[in-house]
Image (spheres, helix red, strand yellow):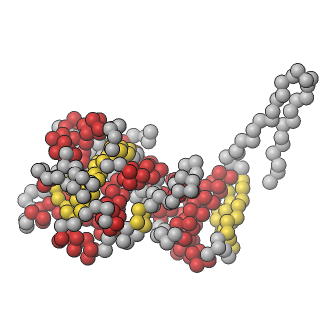
Amino acid sequence: MGRRPTRKPQVGSAADPVISPDPPRAIPNRRAQTEVSFDNQSLLGPLFGQFDANLVQLENRLGVFIHARGDKVVIEGAEDSVARARDVLQTMYDRLAMGQDLDSGAIESMIAMSNEPTLEGIISGEKDAPPIMIRTRRKTIVPRSATQIAYMRSLARDDIVFALGPAGTGKTYLAVAQAVSQLMAGTVQRLILSRPAVEAGEKLGFLPGDMKDKVDPYLRPLYDALYDCMPPEQVERRIASGEIEIAPIAFMRGRTLADAFVILDEAQNTTREQMKMFLTRFGQNSRMVICGDPRQVDIPGGDRMSGLADAVEKMEGVEGFGTIRFTAADVVRHPIVGRIVEAYEGPIE
């Protein structure tokens, strides 16, 4: 690899201005090679993945060539791609060293986040600050996008949080994880999960069974998030004892929700009256998270009747409220989900 020639400054009289050499500029297609070594060899298996699947994923997504030599990994390719691959690989190793799981979805998120100015800063937070994470009984959850970092900070700081954006960005999942974490720590006494029982375009007709059987199909995503954060037997026991309550929004009327972490999902399908009723249920030592996608309104009248947009317009900027907006770039499901969202909703701003 040859050395790039430097420009010599012109020499003139004492009165002549001093002309400094141009600052070095990165050459996107310049070839580079770097070597990364790892201290804990027991982590190399999960780091590389079965049949080196994780390394192959990095190669395919970043256009680099990676090969391992014992506890060292050599990365070759374009200079900027090699730097991104090195940062992602180090973050993968750090995640394993902290006892966290590593799967293709997590790697995909790290690759997307590697476009940010400092990947290490995104995972660890501010300098000298502890890592940004939510601990539950079943797993430790770390942010998978820059917006998730702002969201997790808001969940820990604000009394009421509006989380807006498309499906797959982690709005409800992270809210449930934060709620479970606070319930386990004893900072709240109850966990209340709610959503409007609105049909998304199809007619479900008569549903047999008692009230729980009738509303459970609408609330299934909330159950799924709970079971991912807590052992199933604990979920069932706490539901039976009333510590965890899952109910449609209509069941919130007339109540004061004190000492509770309250989550409203699919909030775009509330009316203005329902949203006002829900927000005014807020009680002492409570937290509320309102999640929804303003572009997927299923109630009659569409966007103009949605209580979510109305509430955000009225409450944004009020002390104690936080508003986090996700885009297709924050989708943490399969990468194609982000492309689907972008195709339907337009280019990412």
Q: Quadrant of the N terminus?
A: bottom right
Q: Residue at x 20, y 54 (%)?
A: 257
| Quadrant assignment for the C terminus | top left
Q: Position of residue 3 (x, y in %)?
A: 82, 49
- Residue 98 horizontal side relative to residue 164, left or right: right
Q: Is residue 348 left or right of residue 9?
A: left
Identify which residue, 164 or 6, lies in the foreground: 164
Q: Tell me how many marks there are.
A: 0
Q: Is residue 44 above or below residue 329?
A: below
Question: Could you tell whether 327 is left or right of 218 in the image?
Answer: right
- In which image quadrant can residue 189 be found? bottom left
Percent across and percent down for residue 217 are 18, 61
Residue at position x 17%, y 59% in the image: 247
Seen from the viewer's position, the closer of residues 147 and 261 is: 261
Is 133 on the left-hand or right-hand side of 124? left
Q: Determine whether 159 is above or below 185 in the image.
A: above
Q: Residue furthest toward the bottom?
A: 42
Residue 331 in view of the camera: no
Q: Say above or below: 182 vs 279.
A: below
Residue 22 position in % (x across, y down): 77, 35
